[in-house]
Amino acid sequence: MSQNQPTRPVRGQEQPIRYGDVFAVSGSLAGEAISPRDAAMMQSAENRALGQTPQGGAASVMESAAMWNEQCGLVGHEQVSDTPGRQGVSVTQTDIPGCPGQRLVTEFVAGQAVGQYFFNTAAGGGADEAGGVAVEMWTDKVSIGEALEAAATTAGYKPVDASDAAAIQAAEATAAGANAVTPGGVAAAAQAAAAANALKYRDDEKTKLGEVVADASAWMAMDKEATREDAERVVAAEMRNNPELRAHPGGVGASMVAAARLNQER
């Protein structure tokens, strides 16, 4: 689920940008203004965990909101909001199975998740450099469609083959509760890409996985939360259709496993 940008209130209404305006949070936190010290705490947490502040991460969103609140005179420069001040902020990292160097970063304010994105620990560059930080903010449990889209980040360069098509078909079928391929759906696109790629010799002429699954959620008629059973079904389909009987590191199956594991932890 993509992270919202700060929604600015109309000037003159004396309403600050609150946590609930930009993050899917609840309770007292949702009604509290985002303050400069809150943003500074998150920036410090990101720097400690990642060695940098990713563009589009929680800290950058909070900084934009806090700056606007301060410029409007709605918060003080040294102000910290009550709930974050008492309960703090944190940044956690989870290794992605089969994806060396790839981690799923989750950011929390007062114990509530405010975002999630992939981080490549092997890349020294910033968020805008290839292989650096791919920000895809999630605040709810990860759906099957979102897990497919994540594969565009972790293995988007890979030419689509029969194992990818089978894994995507299994994922789409699981989400829809049916075994048939949806006409015009992401599985149909994957099957067409795999068939076309099989007739080409040069990888640079082949359709890549990222081209097929980058907007998977929009192609799917139905979607659901990814579970361990869903992940096992997708991985099995991918392995059955791979001559080496294995799943591609960072591919569709690995993304489903990571999504299911994250959902189970939540």
Image: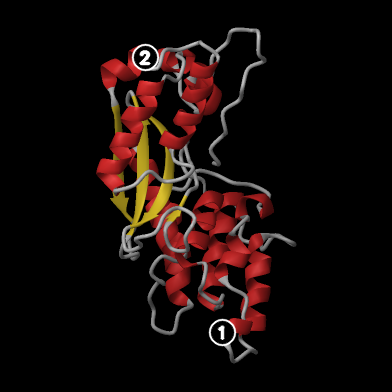
Looking at this rendering, what residue extends furthest in the bottom direction? 201
Q: Identify the residue under disc 1.
A: 203
Q: Amino acid at mark 2?
A: Gln
| Side of 130 relative to 215 (left or right) | left
- 164, 1: nearer the viewer: 1
Q: Can I make out residue 234 in this image?
A: no
| Side of 213 relative to 103 (left or right) | right
Label 1 CA crowd tier, 10 Å (few <14, some 14–19, many 20+): few
Q: Earlier in the sequence, mark 1 or mark 2?
A: 2
Label 2 CA crowd tier, 10 Å (few <14, some 14–19, many 20+): some
Q: Identify the residue under disc 2.
A: 79
Q: Note whether 10 is above or below 167 in the view shown.
A: above
Q: Nearer the viewer, mark 1 or mark 2?
A: 2
Color theme of the render: secondary structure
Q: Position of residue 149 (x, y in %)?
A: 54, 55
- 113, 161: nearer the viewer: 113
User: Residue 173 occupies which quadrant of the picture?
Assistant: bottom right
Residue drawn at x 65%, y 8% is 12
Q: Position of residue 261 (x, y in %)?
A: 35, 48
Residue drawn at x 35%, y 16% is 78
